[in-house]
Amino acid sequence: MIAAMRMTTFWNAIEDLIGAATSQREWAEMLGAEWGPAATLLRPTDKRAEELVCRKGCVDGCMRRVVSLIDGRLRAECGNPSPICDSVILDEAEVNILALDPQGNRVNASVTKL
């Protein structure tokens, strides 16, 4: 339920994003436990991420390239010239770009309940 969610994490995540749109994986990493309730305020776009921010392996926050493997799986690879973080296998949903509901219907209804 949205009302039970601490909105500070959600709004901080929105403020950190230009256009409030990013991959599902990045939304989930930024929001942590609040991902579930916040996901109801987002809509899928027709775009897929080509890069993901490395939030775990690199101290400088390198970008990981999303690579399609021959077997159809996806992998995020370290973008540094000399890779310093491990590759990560992704599922298709994780690279989908999600944005705030452009009509604001879900956002307005949820904020009103707070």
Image (cartoon, rainbow, N blue to C red):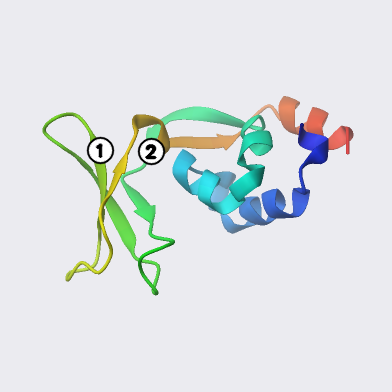
Q: Residue furthest left?
A: 70
Say the numbered circle drawn on residue 95.
2
Picture disc at residue 61: none
- Which residue is drawn at the image coordinates 41% and 62% (left, top)? 56
**Rendered residue at 41%/37% (across/down):** 94
- Quarter of image, res 72: top left
* Residue 80 vertical placement versus 102 (above, below): below
Inspect this view and state whether residue 89 appears. yes
Viewer-side residue, 40 vs 15 = 40
Q: Are marks 1 and 2 in contact (CB under 8 Å)?
A: yes
In the rendered structure, the answer to whether residue 45 lies left or right of residue 75 reads: right
| Badge number at residue 74 | 1
Residue 82 in percent (x, y) is at 17, 71
**Image quadrant for the C terminus?**
top right
Looking at the rendered structure, the number of numbered marks drawn on it comes to: 2
* Residue 101 visible, this angle: no
Q: Quadrant of residue 49?
A: top left
Q: Position of residue 5 (x, y in %)?
A: 76, 43
Tag 1: amino acid: Leu
Residue closest to the eye, 33 or 20 = 33
Location of residue 16 (image quadrant): bottom right
In the image, what residue occupies the spot 37% across and 52% down?
52
The type of residue carrying mark 2 is: Val
